[in-house]
Amino acid sequence: MADERIKTRRYDFDGWGDMELENMPDSPDEIFNEWMDAALDSDEPEPNAFSLATIGEDGFPKNRILYIRDIIDSCPVFYSNYESDKGRQMAKNDHVSMQFFWASLHKQVRIEGHVKKVAPEVSDAYFASRPRASQIGAWASHQSAELSSRDDLEKRIIEITERFEGSEVPRPDFWGGYIVEPVYYEFWLGKASRLHERVCYKKENKKWIKTRRNP
């Protein structure tokens, strides 16, 4: 039986300010950058975390939490194992959706777009900036593949650690970055009584079209 708290738990948003359509910029990039900066400056524990949705071969959307690591030419960038479930799904269907939620700021952003791999040199530079343990983990994890026991993973970590002892850890060919070219943004500002603000930008003929939506 479901806990009664699921039914009764309430949090009334009261996001500061309003989103007047006529005062919104012509491009969503400025707003996204402004909201991301505010999140990074806030007390949010994981301000650059987002939910990534891809489409599986069974037709169902698949969600997982990742981290945005860069913005290149106004496009968000994240990194992953190319051979993971999401890597294979994005190779077959480049349509993805990203969802950011910053509870303390009473804000959400949804981005839909087309994903593709970044240039190898971009992946190389980011991989070199990662902690060494994370670099080794990228080599050791056969991401999304079945794992018979934790011991098997620990053994691979020891093996990779020994292989690269005394040298830099190179980026694996099966690991790297993805860049999302947005075609849709939705900016959500939480308001009292669930009467939230929603402003959307849709790209049509290389131009952004702004609309307001009901909560």
Image (tube, rainbow, N blue to C red):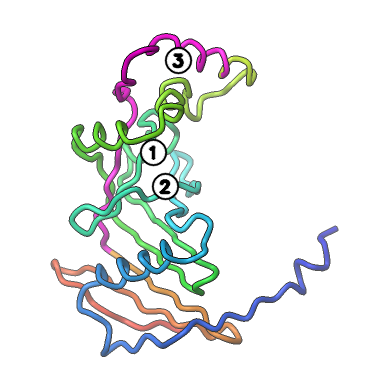
Q: Which percent across, then down, holds residue 196? A: 50, 82
SS for dot 1? helix
Given the image, on which type of amino acid does mark 3 rest?
Thr
Front residue of 32 and 116: 32
Report how far apart the C-alphas of labels 2 and 1 lie in the structure. 7 Å
Quarter of the N terminus within the rendering: bottom right
Does the segment drawn in magenta span residue 163?
yes
Residue 195 placement, left or right of 177: right
Residue 81 placement, left or right of 204: right
Range covered by the magenta-colored residues: 154-183
- Say which residue appears at 45% left-offset and 34% top-offset: 85
The numbered mark at residue 161 is 3
Given the image, on which type of amino acid does mark 2 rest?
Thr
Does the segment drawn in magenta span residue 84?
no
Q: Which residue is mark 1?
A: 89
Report how far apart the C-alphas of labels 1 and 3 lie in the structure. 30 Å
SS for dot 3? helix
Q: Which residue is mark 2?
A: 54
Given the image, on which type of amino acid does mark 1 rest?
Gln
Residue 60 placement, left or right of 25: right
Q: Residues within 10 Å of mark 3 (few under 14, many from 20)?
A: some
First in sequence, mark 2 or 1: give its number.
2
Q: Which percent across, then down, holds residue 149? A: 64, 19
Residue 215 seen in this snapshot: no
